[in-house]
Image (cartoon, rainbow, N blue to C red):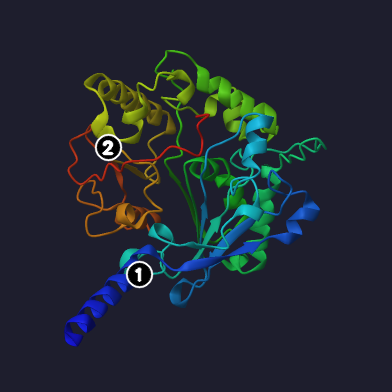
Amino acid sequence: MAGTRLIQWLNLLVWALVMLKTEGANVSITIVEDAVAKGAVCLDGSPPAYHWDKGFGAGINNWLVHIEGGGWCNNVTLCLNRSETRLGSSKHMDKAVAFTGILSRVQNYNPDFYNWNRIKIRYCDGASFTGDVEAVDPATNLHFRGARIWPAVIEDLLSKGMKDAKNAFLSGCSAGGLASILHCDSFRALIPSGATVKCLSDAGYFINVKDISGAQHIEEFYSQVVATHGSAKNLPSSCTSKIKPELIKNILVPTIVDPHGTWHNCRHNIKKCSDDQIQTMQGFRLDFLKALENTGNSSSKGLFIDSCYDHCQTELQETWLFDDSPLLAKTTIAKAVGDWFYDRRPFQKIDCPYPCNPTCHNLVTVLQEHPEL
């Protein structure tokens, strides 16, 4: 009996160790207190924050900066609600978060970046770090200062060694993926000229098409984001000189255009989508691919566009690099990104339409944090 119990405990211990290893080590938060004097603050006026797992060995002068996602707020009411959460205040952020996927320090799970300095910038301004409104309404105490947070955090990292970077990589997920696009050029400008610098947007390339109702609701939504946060002046002039600021992003099925919840189950789980809904999404796929044509055909550009029903695949170990990770051209996301960053080989692959890829996880999602979308 004792021997059996011992074996059970050992099996449990091994299982726990495996889970800890795959889930990643917790990394403590760093509050950028000095940013407050610069007016670089979250929605509630609290200082910005990030998590930093220091590099080691051959990666000590390499820096990966990843920007957290989390939607947007387009008016005072929603931003006020947001200011009472981790997406609007460092007071509500976890003191430590697990680093997995592209942020993992385990070589087997992140072979190209495991020993780099890996940073996760917390997202707390509600506008992808683009807002800058000087005035603060005393009735709400809302601060729209995301555009000030970005340089304040980067300057803090530069003072801690990033000024000596040999390689620097800016990435982000969703709203953070959009931020990585918008701030890529400024990131390049702040890193030593001799360093290799690249930027990755994971699920952050939002195209401008009509939603399922045939209306331009999301165009209006983002017009309100830009107006509320004073973002227009901080968006790339190469874009705003050609199109209106609110046309830079879009979403196919905002909740407000689905009042009867026809798309509710489909949004959460693609296996619950009707044939007509699948057809609608296939049409969106074609619109997305057409929009990509406008980004040019530079050999320096990388593309990993699978047909998996998922949102943000670089942060999760299961989708970044694991035994059953999604594959495109027999290649994991981790391998494709590493090959592209180090110029080992170009990677520009586009998957066949859903449901052709048997390696997809097609995760069941929970859409609760941003019902306005």
Q: Residue furthest front?
A: 1
**Residue 38: percent from left, percent from top:** 78, 52
What's the mark number on residue 307? 2
Q: CA distance from mark 2 to mark 1?
A: 28 Å
User: Residue 232, can we see it?
Assistant: no
Q: Residue at x 26, y 25 (%)?
A: 278
Image-quadrant location for residue 2: bottom left
Q: Secondary structure at mark 1?
A: helix
User: Residue 371, can we see it?
Assistant: yes
Q: Amino acid at mark 1?
A: Lys
Taking the image as shown, residue 203 lies to the left or right of residue 164, namely left
What's the mark number on residue 127? none
Q: Which dot, 2 or 1, sits closer to the camera?
A: 1
User: Crowdedness of circle 2 by 10 Å Cα count: few (<14), some, many (20+)?
Assistant: many
**Residue 341: percent from left, percent from top:** 40, 55
Q: Residue at x 40, y 27 (%)?
A: 291
Disc tally is: 2
Q: Residue furthest bottom?
A: 2
Above or below residue 256? Residue 320 is: below
**Residue 290: percent from left, percent from top:** 36, 25
The residue pinned by badge 1 equals 21
Above or below residue 53? Residue 71 is: above
Sequence-first tag of 2 and 1: 1
**Residue 185: percent from left, percent from top:** 57, 45
